Amino acid sequence: MFVKGALVSASLIMAIGGQNAFVLKNGLKKNNVFAVSLICFLCDFLLMTIGVLGLGSILATNKWLSGGLAIFGAAFLGVYGFNSFKSSFAGNDALLIDGQNQVSDKLKTTVLATLAVTLLNPHVYLDTVVIVGGIAGTLAFEQKLQFLAGALLASFVWFFGLGFGARFLLPLFQKPKAWRILEFVIGCIMWWIAFGLLAFAYRLFIGQ
């Protein structure tokens, strides 16, 4: 369950988006990198914990909510994975960020900007509370703790690695081929998780 939690979290976090671009840009600028990475991780910590231990517990006791969310999650991840595969085979985008040294912003300004780019994005709630919480809702309590630990570790490693390793990763991220490989891997993981959710819903409603 620890590995599954890490894979689920990593596949959701690694998807190219505004938050990751924000972390990368601040990493390249050496702009309050620790604060940016920590805030992103703490937001994940709070939302994933609510999803796994809060929403997940409610879902585990309600067949229709649990099964319905599993089907919804599978559909969402199926589309998510499809888009990743589409980007992998047809996309030529590369992440372009100005890597020149710039003066760091004030800590307060950076903190507010990080909270905004994280919490004002509705996708973060779908990923952390609905998807992660929904998957965890199918697990026993001990398994939930292992799943949550894996998910949080992946979040911690990703954000701090992305922030502090941004300067080393920029040449790679400027190559379209690297993004296409990443998108393909994400698509495979998404479809694997979606299949597992559909199998759970099938056992819940049909197979006993």
Image (tube, rainbow, N blue to C red):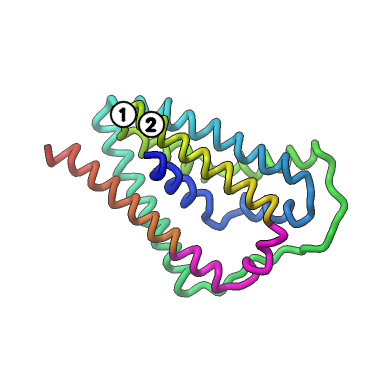
Q: Residue at x 48, y 28 (%)?
A: 50
Q: Is 93 drawn above or below residue 134 in the view shown?
A: below
Q: Quadrant of residue 171?
A: bottom right
Q: Where's residue 118, x and y in %? A: 62, 42
Say which quarter of the image contains residue 111. top right
**Majority secondary structure of magenta residues:** helix
The amino acid marked with disc number 1 is: Ala
The numbered disc on residue 144 is: 2
As helix, strand or loop, the secondary structure at mark 2 comes to helix
Q: Position of residue 124 (x, y in %)?
A: 53, 42
- Who's the residue at 63% across and 68% down the image? 172
Q: Residues within 10 Å of mark 1 (few under 14, many from 20)?
A: few
User: Residue 34 versus residue 116: which sits nearer the camera?
Assistant: 34
Q: Is residue 44 left or right of residue 149?
A: right
Point 33% across, 45% down: residue:
72
Tell whether label 2 touches label 1 (CB within 8 Å).
yes
Q: Position of residue 4 (x, y in %)?
A: 39, 44
- Of residues 66 and 150, the one drawn nearer to the viewer in this rendering: 150
Inspect the image, locate mark 2, and give the three-letter code of the amino acid beneath it: Lys
Is-magenta flag for residue 66?
no
Residue lying at 26% horizontally and 47% vertically, measured from the top left: 198
Quadrant of the image containing the C terminus: top left
Q: Is residue 77 above or below residue 146?
A: below
Q: Is residue 175 magenta?
A: yes
User: Which contiguous range is marked in magenta?
Assistant: 166-184
- Give the crowd class for mark 2: few <14, some 14-19, many >=20 residues within 10 Å: many
Quadrant placement of the N terminus: top left
Q: Which residue is mark 1?
A: 140
Per the image, label 1 sits on a secondary structure element best described as loop
